Image (spheres, rainbow, N blue to C red):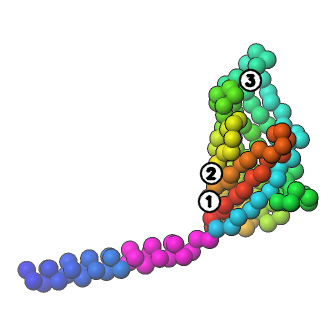
């Protein structure tokens, strides 16, 4: 009996140490990078899918716009994507890719008509190939420019 108890205690101790080491490795391996760009919404097109002439569920928004640096001076990339109207006057469900010099970042999530939105980063390429994290979208001006703040975790 004592031999089995020692084996169980040793096995439990080894498992606990392995768990702690794996948690330390995971938490120290991840790093976060903040990227801020300004989208100039110059190509946005809304397709009235039901032909009723009104903003309605199922309408489609497509775009392919330039992205500017955080100072809104220099072009640093482009984006392209689409959104489906979920509730008229309330929200769209969107997905798009931002193409930057060192790779691309894909996002998906709600675009709210009345306030900031937070989307999930679903992946990327290049420097962002293992990307996760979030992107906050804030409307500037009159809806012709948007600030995207990516918190990229790799």
Q: Earlier in the sequence, mark 3 or mark 1?
A: 3
Mark 1 secondary-structure assignment:
strand
Mark 2 secondary-structure assignment:
strand
Occupied quadrant, residue 46: top right
- Neighbour tally class for label 3: few under 14, some 14-19, many 20 plus, Cα within 10 Å: some
Q: Which residue is mark 2?
A: 120
Q: Main SS of the magenta segment?
A: helix
Determine if residue 66 is in view: yes
Q: Considering the image in quadrants, where does the N terminus appear?
A: bottom left
Q: Which residue is mark 1?
A: 132
Discs 3, 1 touching: Cβ within 8 Å: no
Q: Is residue 26 magenta?
A: yes
Mark 3 secondary-structure assignment:
loop
Q: Is residue 8 above or below residue 132?
A: below
Tell me which segment is drawn in magenta: 18-31
| Residue 82 point in image, percent of width and height | 75, 39
């Amino acid at each position: 009996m004592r031999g089995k108890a020692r084996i169980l205690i040793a096995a439990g101790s080894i498992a606990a140490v392995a768990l702690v080491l794996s948690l330390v490795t995971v938490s120290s391996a991840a790093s976060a990078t903040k990227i801020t760009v300004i989208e100039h919404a110059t190509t946005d097109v809304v397709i009235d899918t039901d032909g009723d002439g009104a903003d309605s569920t199922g309408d489609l928004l497509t775009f392919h716009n330039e992205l500017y640096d955080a100072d809104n001076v220099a072009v640093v990339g482009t984006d392209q994507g689409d959104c489906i109207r979920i509730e008229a006057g309330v929200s769209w469900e969107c997905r798009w890719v931002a193409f930057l010099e060192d790779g691309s970042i894909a996002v998906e999530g709600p675009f709210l008509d009345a306030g900031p939105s937070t989307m999930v980063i679903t992946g990327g390429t290049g420097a962002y190939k293992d990307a996760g994290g979030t992107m906050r979208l804030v409307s500037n001006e009159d809806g012709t420019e948007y600030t995207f703040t990516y918190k990229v975790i790799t």
